[in-house]
Amino acid sequence: MRLDLARRWEGLILVLLAGVVVWASLGVDGFANGSNISFLLLDTTEIALMALTMTLVIIAAEIDLSVASTLGLSCAVLGRLWNAGLPIEAIMPICLLVGAACGAFNGLLVTRLGLPSLAVTIGTFALFRGLAYVILGDQAVADLPPAYTGLATASFGPVPVATVLVAVLAAVAAVVLHATGPGRSIFALGSNEEAAFFAGVRVKRIKLWLFVASGVMASLASLVYTFRYASARADNGVGLELAVVAAVLLGGVSIFGGRGTLPGVLMAVLLLGVVRNALILADVANEVLNFVTGLLLVASVLAPNVGAVWRRRTSPQVEGKSAT
Amino acid sequence: MTTRTPWRPTALLAGLVLLTAACGGTTKSDVAKQQSSAPAASSAPADPNAPLKQGLKIAFLPKQVNNPYFTIADDGGAAAAKEFGGEAKEVGPSEASASSQVSYINTLIQQKQDAIVISANDPNAVVPALTRARAAGIKVVSYDSDTAPAGRHVFVNQASAEDLGRTEVQLLAEQIGHKGKIAVLSATPNATNQNTWIDFMKDELKKPEYKEMELVKVAYGNDEDQKSFTETQGLLRSYPDLAGIISPTTVGIAAAARYLSDSPYKGKVKLTGLGTPNQLKKFVKDGTIEAFELWNPADLGYLASYAAAALASGQISGAEGEKFKAGKLGEYTVGAKGEVLLGKPTVFNKENIDKFDF
């Protein structure tokens, strides 16, 4: 039943995405050409990267609101070390370690102390961003190596290099989530943590690694972000966590955990990116833009629930609390 | 069901491999060397007699939309565009974040605008996108907040440090009849802008017409309202015969005005400096402040619009010494590093303050 509903939602997003693309190609000047598609894909890179791990985290019935702050902290570390004269090739792994440490910090608080991830990551949301300002202050580091800033904006035809990175990691994440034991464990502990625990799933361990993965992905996104904008600042990526969570929910992942698919999330990331790009190209005012995005999100949270309630009313015996 | 998670290191490794690519160690000093050896870009010669083209599409990209200061500036730009037969529009993010302007620049490239007039949230983050815009033949003017020079052809600077420093002394001198003790209420002790202005104030005070004026103290309110308030209080306790205060910061002048308006010094101790009309309107009306100054944002947008049109029409290329006409504001010359200076700041007083809303 649940899988069925998820599939249906994905289908709807796909239809919506196709509809918007067709409308924009026909009706919006400058949408359907290689360089615009390239910008559009590039603009969704960081959100897509962080959404990959956020999907797993939310399916496991947790949330990580500190991703954008982790990104900022990682940018600040990069800037500070670069100013100190370290080679960029040494700085990048350090940034990924910083991300891993941030994730581990979240994960340990959630799993060892049993604190709710919403509260923990709201705390670290402020903590990591604050730390970023302590490390780099309000300065911007911009003299980054052109070889890397060039790579971050380079593309094969209309497909940016960064999008290839997203595609590779998305494939890895999708296989892990949908075709391996750990993936099944994530679904299991998301639908019913206690049952999963008694079935032998190492709940805490998996959750800890999910947070670590989320942190690493945020710092990977920070590298793309820093090179793409050729600017390392403590305020890089402010507010991105909401865009990430929004895309994941729009992609049909249940905020209560246990349900969702990666292809759905990726399509949602793309849908939000296309809508934004097309509306800006069509000179739609920013307020309307935010309104439309908000509407899509409310619809995404509302629709599956309304659908479920409606089906329960029409055929009360079908929908039950059946276990997977 | 296995509990090991070998996929995570795999993902990490994949990211590392893709990002580090095949490259030796690159450090800050390597990049500095490369950049210093890069040749300067040359631009096509400008034709000062070229007429302004009709129907130019000019896009204003402020730090954020729905900000009264930028709304006035961009309306000024639109008024200019109307005069020379162009179309101006304002687009931009609703939050002034560092990189939110980049996706707007990219869409403006797609829309094939003739010129982009930008106030940069991050002087560096917008440069790669603006470089693409310039490669696509779009002229770029920065206003209010400059981008790194590689990103634009011309920067329309709202006010020079020298003008701001000197005119504030002139403004106060007129109000106190060129004599008496004066003090400065600044921002932080190491605020670059304020310190440059104060140096010019001191230089102006050396002129013979100010021989009866004495700068007794520079106080620092750290751009905090409460600290500026108590510093003003302290100034008047130490120098009860103070004739005037200059506060070259919008936070400082408002706090000083609030203190003075409730004190017996109201109207007796003159206060001037840099402020915004909305913030100081009530103090001008109740007589605490006679006059203060700031650049006029509408003129800033107006001039930026004409600069964009002159660039797009080939009248100027952004090189030093080129001249162009900017409607009612008259003729302007491009200065060093592609800067165009708006001119002397606008003085706000009882007579004109109601005409401004920002």
Image (cartoon, coloured by chain):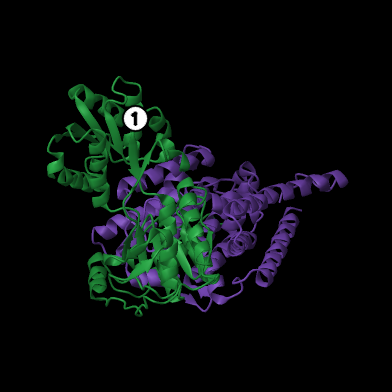
Q: Colour of chain B?
A: green
Residue placed at 32% from the left, 45% from the top? A134
Q: Between residues A42 and B139, which one lies in front from this camera angle?
A: B139
Residue A287 in the image: x percent, y percent?
A: 59, 51
In the displayed structure image, the side of residue A126 where residue B199 appears, left or right: left
Q: Label 1 belongs to which residue? A: B257
In this view, A191 is above or below B178: below
In this view, B136 is above or below B158: below
In the displayed structure image, the side of residue B248 where residue B135 appears, left or right: right
Q: Between residues A191 and B138, which one lies in front from this camera angle?
A: B138
Q: Quadrant of residue B39?
A: bottom left
Determine if residue A100 is in view. Answer: no
The residue tagged with tag 1: helix, strand or loop?
Answer: helix
Q: Residues within 10 Å of mark 1 (few under 14, many from 20)?
A: many
Residue placed at 67% from the left, 50% from the top? A295
Q: Colour of chain A?
A: purple
In the displayed structure image, the side of residue B343 where residue B141 appears, left or right: right
Q: Chain of mark 1?
A: B
Q: Between residues B328 and A172, which one lies in front from this camera angle?
A: B328
Residue B358 in the image: x percent, y percent?
A: 45, 43
Residue B256 in the image: x percent, y percent?
A: 31, 30
- Residue furthest to the right in view is A314
What amino acid is found at the position of numbered circle 1 in the picture?
A: Ala
